[in-house]
Amino acid sequence: MSKSDKSAKTNPEAVSKEAADKAHLDIRGKKLDLDILKATMGPDVIDVQNFYKRSGYFTFDPGYTSTASCESKITFIDGDEGTLLYRGYPIDQLAEYGDYLETCYLLLYGELPTQAERRQFDDAITYHTMVQEQMSIFFRGFRRDAHPMAIMVAVVGALSAFYHDSLDINDPEQREIATRRMIAKVPTLAAMAYKYSLGQPFVYPRNDLDYASNFLHMCFSVPAEDYKVNPVLARAMDRIFILHADHEQNASTSTVRLAGSSGANPFACVAAGIACLWGPAHGGANEAALNMLEEIGTPERIPEFIARAKDRNDPFRLMGFGHRVYKNYDPRAKIMQRTAHEVLSEVGHKDDPLLQVAHELEQIALKDDYFLERKLYPNIDFYSGITLRALGFPTSMFTVLFALARTVGWIAHWREMIADPTRRIGRPRQLYTGPVRRSYVPMSKRGTGLGADYHRD
């Protein structure tokens, strides 16, 4: 009897603990023991890194809904409970008591900054907000009616052509420089994209303004007159940035990680994330929710659209309800609802009919069995479109603002991945269902390939 066998006989708990740390799999008579990796919060994970090597099989998981693509310490989501934590801190506390740059520091470095650390970080961001002057010439190459997201994909990727001294991903100092440059410069580029769409001159950043105020100033001021940033609107903008700063391994973040796994420079990786975010199923959802509220128009028409949403034969869908991860109330939606009321009240649209429609629709959805059974709770997109419109942004800018806020999350995940000693280039596998091996057929033996009804002109 081996030493471990003796231990198991004298200590039955050792057997149960060992069994609990393993997943036992029987594949056509072949038995495998797979390690179970412990999480600090959320589900533990079955380690299948060597599954193919040991079994000869791949796993099949379209959309990666049951697959942990990486180990991360940045953001935690519990969709069933409606929980969102940045480095362990609840999103509602950060949005209520902190600001965006403090949240950036937390996501990047893992802890809230001290006064000295915060002052140094703020200064580093503030004094990197200007972009190379030749970037303004680059903008002139776009059509005036180009979508701002198309411009953002191009100009953020182009930063690698202007800042050669921060492209070496293996140099920690260069990674740090690239990090601060992107957090500082993406708002400037976003404001330039907005101004370009209007045909207005670019507005330079100002070092005497905070992050959100500076962005609003670059977007809405003009050389012909003074512009004073409304502190209520600036606070709302800052809160929107916090709410969108990170959201775990979503499509765009996974895109950034996958691009980064090849060793691509950070500017290119973030540009890839922006391109992915542009998809209507990802970053465009708030615009779709706003369009839906405009289609409904008035609270009196809500029952009609509720009935349509329940009709399987009707293509209409309620946008801004439900979430791929959250099966409870999206914690960000509660904060965004309050923010929407604050902004609309401040700008004189407290009685905005769209807000009335949104509020009434939300109350119905939270009581209607159809929505409750399907766990279709309002998400952040439900209110963010109204808020951004009240701030003065057109719908074409909504996803740009999302990208601006999410830049820090992308960078935090990119940095975490680059620093991981076990990093490997991403290489998903597939379930192949195409033709089996076959031999090449010479052209002379392939026939004409023309159907019986084919006629030459």
Image (spheres, rainbow, N blue to C red):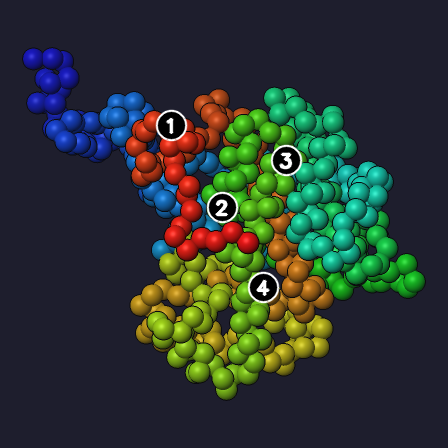
How far apart are labels 4 and 3 at the CA level? 26 Å
The residue lying at 68 percent from left, 55 percent from top is 147
Q: Is residue 415 visible?
A: yes
Determine whether the residue tagged by mark 3 lies in a helix, strand or loop: helix
Q: Position of residue 418 (x, y in %)?
A: 54, 27
In the image, taking residue 27 as reference, residue 218 lies left or right, namely right
Label 4: how many Cα within 10 Å (few below 14, some 14–19, many 20+): many
The residue lying at 66 percent from left, 73 percent from top is 344
Q: Is residue 253 or residue 117 the one in the foreground?
A: 253
Q: Position of residue 227 (x, y in %)?
A: 85, 62
| Mark closer to the chain start, 1 or 3 | 3
How far apart are labels 4 and 1 at the CA level? 50 Å
Determine whether the residue tagged by mark 1 lies in a helix, strand or loop: loop
The residue lying at 57 percent from left, 26 percent from top is 263
How far apart are labels 3 and 2 at the CA level? 16 Å
Residue designated by label 3: 268
Q: Is residue 334 visible?
A: no
For badge 1, the amino acid type reads Tyr
Q: Is residue 189 above or below residue 56?
A: below
In what quadrant of the picture does the C terminus appear?
bottom right
| Mark closer to the chain start, 2 or 1 | 2
Residue designated by label 1: 440
Label 3: how many Cα within 10 Å (few below 14, some 14–19, many 20+): many
